[in-house]
Image (cartoon, rainbow, N blue to C red):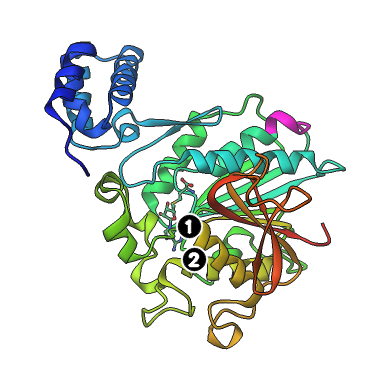
Amino acid sequence: MPRLPPSLFWKARREISPLAASLLPACRDLQSTANELRWIKEHVQDTKSPIPAKIRVWRLVEKRAKGIPLQYVLGTQPFGDLEIKCRPGVLIPRPETETYTLHLATLLTQSHPPPPSLSILDLCTGTGCIPLLLLHSLQTTLPQTTPITIHGVDISPTAIALARKNHTHNPPPSPSPHHTLTFTQHDIFSPTLLSTLYPPNQNQKLPQIDLLTSNPPYISPHDFTHHTARAVRNHEPRLALVPSPTQLADGSNSRYACRPEDVFYAHLLEIAKAVRPRRVLMEVGGWEQAVRVVGMVFLGGEGGKDRGGGGGVGGYEVEVWRDEPAAAAASSGATGDGVERVEVAGREVVVRGVGRGRAVYLRLRED
Ligand SMILES: C[S@@+](CC[C@H](N)C(=O)[O-])C[C@H]1O[C@@H](n2cnc3c(N)ncnc32)[C@H](O)[C@@H]1O
């Protein structure tokens, strides 16, 4: 990271406030410094405490100056219309996740005829931001009587406790007995995952899941060490970012013959094969990973069926979504009909929106 010139510190002190000079190394430019200082002051104004406001501002600035992300300093992050509580040990929700979550909610509510009921499963839920925003958006657009059942799952007890707090912190605009959202602590690699979430009934059939979402850990140990921003590496949980050693492709316990950073996708696709959700949305870490995951949908893990990938997941239309999936395709990538496509394993795949590769979206063909 390049060093900041001393003149910038003087400018921050003169044009913003003496406190701004402390914030500058964490914020890196004057505009962000001014914004963050304003948000810290607003936060202090809005929260009651016997400690004088000036001291509280100073303490928060000190924390932020150490490089602690603002969301952990203030304890919240806006996510759509929601305010998501954040705390160290649980990944901070990202704006790109918010964008595709809102787009998903729009797709679900715009389907014709409107869905008679909705069952959603969010694996690796963290703060619970994805299921909470989906529920909020669906509650405001679908009839109150449409049954909505949502499960959020995470291996981390800290995440699950925070997700439950976030549920209470973001009450529905109008509560309905037809809507349920449950957060469960579970390892998604455990063979008891589905029977825990959906206890077997008389006919032993799993309920139809309308949407499976997941933003899993997807960074390789090498990229985490060499290419992940220092603030993320030092302050956000590795568990949320890097698949843990027992799930690694090169670890002796792994069932999947794929790259270490793709191992959650191999497993999510196994779950999709068993459950056949109507739609599946998996967040990915960029274009190359998106293409690899599409390849896994078609062929199974790297090397196909014989190497643990299970031979792919048939019956789905597959799309790659960029950061802003609802935006018109960039003209350079678009073909004559204005739609961007990419060829993967000899098949054409539609690419939606603009920005970096952000998600792989599957839609069951009969839907
Ligand atoms: C990238 S974070 C995503 C959090 C949240 N969904 C979001 O978008 O902000 C990945 C999450 O996966 C969880 N996780 C890691 N390994 C897991 C496992 N084996 N089973 C379930 N959850 C796991 C982590 O605790 C973390 O909360």
- Along the horizontal axis of the image, is 49 left or right of 219? left
Q: Are marks 2 and 1 in contact (CB under 8 Å)?
A: yes
Local SS, label 2: helix
Residue at the spot 57% in from the left edge and 43% down from the top edge: 131
Is residue 143 located in the magenta-colored stretch of the structure? yes
Comparing 199 with 147, the one in front is 147
Amino acid marked by disc 1: Pro
Q: Is residue 176 visible?
A: no
Mark 1, ligand 1, within 8 Å: the answer is yes
Residue that badge 2 annotates = 264
Image quarter in which the C terminus is found? bottom right
Instruction: Note whether ligand 1 is within 8 Å of mark 2.
Output: yes
Dividing the picture into quadrants, the one containing residue 306 is: bottom right
Residue 192, percent from left and from top: 54, 69
Label ID, residue 216: 1
Q: Nearer the viewer, residue 308 or 90?
A: 308
